[in-house]
Amino acid sequence: MSKTYYDPSDLRKFGKITEWSEELGNKFFDYYGKVFEEGALTAREKSLIALAVAHTEQCPYCIDAYTKDGLQRGITKEEMMEAIHVGAAIKSGATLVHGVQMMNKVNKLEM
Amino acid sequence: MKKSLLARNNDLANTTRQLEILSNGIFQNGELPTFADKIKETNQFPLRPKKLEILQINLGYMCNQVCAHCHVDAGPDRKEIMTTETMQQCLDVIKKTGAHTLDLTGGAPEMNPNFRWFVEEASKAGIKDFIVRSNLTIIRANKKYYDLPEFFKKHNVHVVSSMPHWTRGKTDKQRGNGVFDKSIKALQMLNEVGYGKEGSGLQLDLVYNPSGAFLPGDQAALESDFKKALHEDFNIVFNSLFAITNLPISRFLDYLIASENYEDYMYALVEAYNPMAVENVMCTNTLSISWDGWLYDCDFNQMLNLKVASKVKHISEYNEELLQKRNIIISQHCYGCTAGAGSSCQGTVA
């Protein structure tokens, strides 16, 4: 039997983290639940943000969870892919903008 | 066009096989609690009827569509339709029932050759809310159906129609190629005679079923998205949207197993279990009558051939008082009606 670090069925066990640290676990889930409630942003918008961040964090559990969450909310696959591109653009932009630091260093060191 | 499970001789056309699947595996080895055990936790076992409010009559399994998720396993190859004799027995019951809602369903109920006669007769009984579940495309399937919107209006029928999404791709994937365009045209025809329009008194509601192995989201949010998109794109209006969970039976069960989503889906249903939804689950206020006159706790039990646990099992021997004393038959498919905000033919219940 092949073993991997990630098991999709582990997502169902997420709630069990409270068993080894009840107070902190409960505080986390209370906070988490509150974050995703309707607010200045709609729950739908938050779901798309979560999906994009799930990808930049490369969290397979979060990707599964927020893909399903999006489908449940009637979010289309085109909307989901655009959200992921936003994440990808920021991720690549964040890499590339450090190029300025490299340029600064080169300019400082070279005669 | 695809065929029904029955026409394909699929194993799951056998209801005993479906019930075996729903009772074995993760429910047999204790991984997940059975529905009976779950409702025992909150002292809601056995499930008993409350006041009868809705008579739901299935006029037959014949349909012009073969939807991927259909719990009826309906389609053009299904020939089971209600006879005038059984319709007359239903009319006798409708005249004396305490129920305030009559709900005609199918298949496509309009395909029953005696549909119009039955609606005309039933509308004389003074039922408060008279629903016909129309799949929309039937209105565009043949010229003889083009006047259905006028016919519905004449008899003040409340039209409830399926629409899984406001986009063509998602709708056609679930309900068949071309269904979206025909449904849009049919909705426009219903709007033209006044359905869904403010002040018309003609009620047009849509039913949303998820097009895949996931649960419906918030009903109010989906209704708002549907209203915005259908109005902006097609100038269509409607009254309410009912978000209905797909129950793991028949063609949807077949899909869940084939796509290896069955266990995850059952986990999702059990995790979303809501005891508040059990309180108002539709089998507590509904009776379902099949095309051949048998009585069931709900349309889903009808499709699993689980007849009411009562001495009275057929419309010919109908006795409302006796029927109200029965226990409701349950199995693991019932989790579909108690997940989240609950699910019924009238949408959420909790």
Image (cartoon, coloured by chain):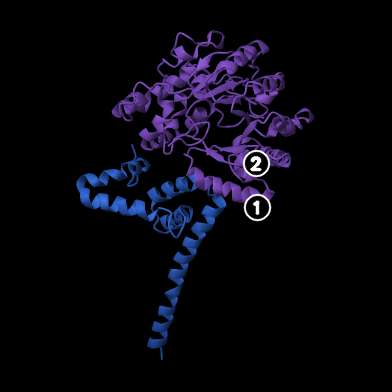
Residue under numbered circle 1: B232
Graded by Cα atoms within 10 Å as few (under 14), some (14 to 19) or many (20 or more), the crowding at tag 2 reads many
Q: Quadrant of the C terminus of chain B?
A: top left
Q: Secondary structure at mark 2?
A: loop
* Between A110 and B99, the one nearer to me in the picture: B99
**Amino acid at the residue labelled 1:** Glu
The residue nearer to you, when weighing A29 against B29, is A29
User: Does any portion of residue A30 appear in the rendered image?
Assistant: yes
- Residue type at tag 2: Gly
Front-lying residue, A93 or B65: B65
The colour with which the image depicts chain B is purple
* Residue at 78%, 27% in the rendered image: B144
Q: What distance separates the C-alpha of mark 1 from that of mark 2? A: 15 Å
Chain corresponding to blue in the figure: A
**In the image: residue A31, left or right of residue B161:** left
- In the image, B285: left or right of B170? left
x%, y% of residue B44? Answer: 34, 26
Q: Which residue is mark 2?
A: B196
| Labels 1 and 2 within one chain | yes
Query: Label 1 is found on which chain of the structure?
Result: B
Q: Using the image, name the chain to which the residue with label 2 belongs.
A: B
Closer to us: mark 1 or mark 2?
2
Quarter residue B34 falls in: top left
- Residue at (57% x, 15% y) in the render: B93
Q: Return the x and y of residue B294 as percentages of the image width and height.
A: 54, 13
- Number of residues whose C-alpha sits closer than 10 Å to that of mark 1, classed few (under 14), some (14–19) or many (20 or more): few
Residue B336 screen position, x and y as percent: 44, 31
The answer to which quarter of the image holds residue B273 is top left
Image quadrant of residue B6? top right
Question: Where's residue B252, x and y in %?
Answer: 52, 30
